[in-house]
Image (cartoon, rainbow, N blue to C red):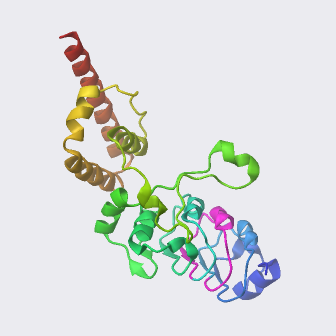
Amino acid sequence: MKLTRTMVLSRAKASELNNVRKLNCWGSRLTDISICREMPSLEVITLSVNSVSTLEPVSRCQQLRELYLRRNRIASLTELSHLKGLPRLRVLWLAENPCCGADPHLYRMTVLRNLPNLQKLDNQAVTEEELSRALMEGEEVTAPSREGAGNGRPELSYALSATHPTAANQGAPLTYREEASSVQGQLGLKPPARDRFPSLQRAVVSSRKNRSNVLTAILLLLRDLDTDALEVVHQTVVNRLEALHRQELHEDLE
């Protein structure tokens, strides 16, 4: 069943879709919620106990704070990519969907890694410790690639489905280069060229656990910094990279 304009206005007791802020469609046998694209002011929507299979329509709801989707047909966690651009989203209930798979820990870590601003997931409060662990134990869901744009469906790097619930565990752990590039990407810096710091890489690999703890702490602290503070971090990182580059050149000359 398709969610229609008439249904929305009736349930929300509104005159225009633009004015709808809260909508309850619990147990309405819905399969199509495309009309959500026309509700930019939507803040809370309840879609639990339906047959919704994609989250793309709510990606336009920039004011969305709470999204309830328990017991639907979300087959893959790649659908999280549609929620990454919602800056106000704080509450998500996604339990009892096929995408949850057979490993509840991996599922929760993956959701929190991709949506770190959540304060409550599946009716359970999110802790700082969980957010820290999610950076290391969750899987990253990337944005659709340009190559996949032609077929109308996003191509993402990770999918945890009911058919292959533990597929994500089979991937190789991040290498030093991948991990460093990820951190620099979040800092807004250009990643270093391949093998730019070979001796540094050899040294850091030997203390991988300590490095991971440091990176986790950095990423958590960055969320609390304002623009001026981030500029200081940016300049410090640039200076550090330049110093390491000079050190490598000096070692090569010797």
Residue 95, above or below 60: below
Give percent across and percent down for residue 122.
46, 79
* Start-end of magenta stretch: 48-70
Q: Quadrant of the C terminus?
A: top left
Residue 250 screen position, x and y as percent: 21, 15
Does the magenta run of residues contain 250? Answer: no
Query: Along the line of sight, which residue is nearer the eye, 218 or 145?
Result: 145
- Residue drawn at 41 percent across, 60 percent down: 169
- Viewer-side residue, 127 vs 195: 195
Q: Position of residue 44 (x, y in %)?
A: 58, 77
Question: Residue visible at 64% across and 76% down?
Answer: 73
65 horizontally vs 182: left or right: right
Position above or below: 128 against 124: above
Q: What residue do we see at 32% from left, 71% from top?
A: 127
Q: Quadrant of residue 237?
A: top left
Can residue 114 be seen here?
no
For the N terminus, the image quarter is: bottom right
Q: Position of residue 179 (x, y in %)?
A: 36, 44
Is 50 inside the magenta-drawn segment?
yes
* Image quadrant in which you'd find residue 235: top left
Please identify the dominant SS of the magenta region.
loop
**Rendered residue at 52%/61% (across/down):** 87
Q: Is residue 36 visible?
A: yes
Left or right side of 27 for 118: left
Q: How many marks?
A: 0
As drawn, is 63 to the left or to the right of 153? left
Which of the two residues, 205 or 108, is positioned nearer the viewer here? 205
